[in-house]
């Protein structure tokens, strides 16, 4: 019995979950000396199979499941992108969900100019959506904002997000769900004198057939 318990203790120690800074330590398994013999033998057999197979016990977080984390899901999918209301397609864009619903990745592929990617996530600590954009020019731009009462995601341009890099003029990028297969994205600049937002550019995303990837 002691031999089985010792073996179980050693194997379970190898597999014990750890927590990084700021994370709660997961509940620990029952101590071997408190387990019945048949339970110990089953635990040794199971643990040995896992370790010898080079596997580990999954220790995954719950992921991002809050309603706020799902606000941007209307953007997920494969899209043909046109300027304004034009039927002309100027780019393709693929938006995908990753890391247990916590990360939205954008793959922007215009037919002209630089390709680029963005990583988007809801920051529950301050109730804001954050985007980091980088393209083939090497320029990095940070955005942050929230969903307004009308369901529009509004992200303010923060420049590189470092030091005093914030743009002199206030600009923002907006995303609105038109219907299940259509999304409007547009950029605005704030006119301080008139105290109004003026549209500088606009895109219409039309979902490709069979490209719906919403959860």
Image (tube, rainbow, N blue to C red):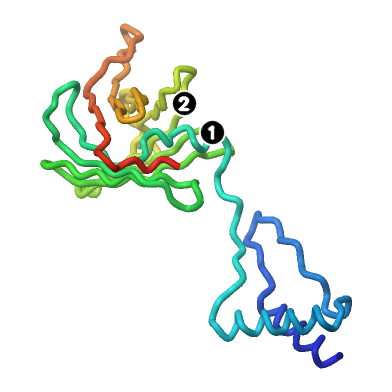
How dense is the environment of label 2, judged by Cα within 10 Å: few (below 14), some, or many (20 and up)? some
94 w.r.t. 72: above or below: below
Q: How many numbered marks are there?
A: 2
Q: Are marks 2 and 1 in contact (CB under 8 Å)?
A: yes
Question: Can you give x and y, in whole percent of width and height, for residue 80 in the image?
Answer: 21, 36
Q: Residue at x 31, y 26 (%)?
A: 168
Question: Can you give x and y, in whole percent of width and height, for residue 133 in the image?
Answer: 32, 43
- Front residue (pair 78, 133): 78
How dense is the environment of label 1, judged by Cα within 10 Å: few (below 14), some, or many (20 and up)? some
Q: Residue at x 31, y 6 (%)?
A: 194
The image quadrant that residue 180 belongs to is: top left
Q: State left or right for residue 36 relative to residue 91.
A: right
Query: In which quadrant is the C terminus drawn?
Result: top left
Q: Which mark is residue 68?
A: 1
The image quadrant that residue 176 belongs to is: top left
Question: Can you give x and y, in whole percent of width and height, for residue 11 in the image?
Answer: 70, 83
Question: Can you give x and y, in whole percent of width and height, for residue 158 in the image?
Answer: 38, 34
Q: State left or right for residue 131 relative to residue 206.
A: right
- Front residue (pair 124, 206): 206
132 w.r.t. 145: above or below: below
Residue at far bottom of view: 3
Asked if residue 162 shows in the view, the reply is no
Q: Give the distance between the C-alpha atoms of the residues marked 2 and 1, in whole angstroms.
A: 9 Å
Query: In which quadrant is the N terminus drawn?
Result: bottom right
Identify the element where label 1 is drawn. helix
First-in-chain label (2 vs 1): 1
Please name the residue that numbered disc 2 is placed on: 147
140 w.r.t. 167: above or below: below
Q: Residue at x 60, y 55 (%)?
A: 61
Q: Residue at x 72, y 84 (%)?
A: 44
């Amino acid at each position: 019995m002691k031999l089985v318990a010792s073996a179980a203790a050693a194997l379970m120690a190898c597999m014990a979950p750890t927590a990084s800074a700021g994370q709660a330590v997961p509940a620990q398994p029952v101590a071997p000396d408190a387990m019945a013999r048949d339970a110990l033998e089953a635990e040794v057999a199971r643990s040995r199979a896992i370790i010898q197979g080079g596997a580990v016990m999954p220790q995954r977080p719950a992921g991002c499941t809050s309603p706020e984390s799902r606000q941007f899901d209307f953007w997920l999918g494969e899209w043909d992108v046109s300027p304004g209301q034009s039927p002309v397609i100027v780019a393709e864009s693929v938006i995908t969900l990753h890391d247990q619903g916590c990360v939205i990745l954008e793959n922007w592929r215009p037919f002209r100019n630089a390709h680029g990617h963005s990583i988007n996530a809801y920051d529950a600590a301050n109730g804001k959506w954050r985007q980091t954009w980088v393209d083939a020019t090497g320029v990095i731009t940070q955005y942050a904002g929230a969903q307004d009462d009308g369901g529009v995601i509004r992200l303010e341009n923060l420049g590189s997000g470092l030091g005093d890099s914030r743009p002199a003029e206030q600009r923002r990028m907006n995303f609105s769900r038109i219907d299940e297969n259509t999304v409007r994205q547009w950029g605005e600049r704030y006119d301080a004198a008139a105290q109004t937002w003026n549209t500088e550019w606009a895109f219409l995303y039309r979902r490709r057939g069979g490209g719906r990837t919403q959860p």
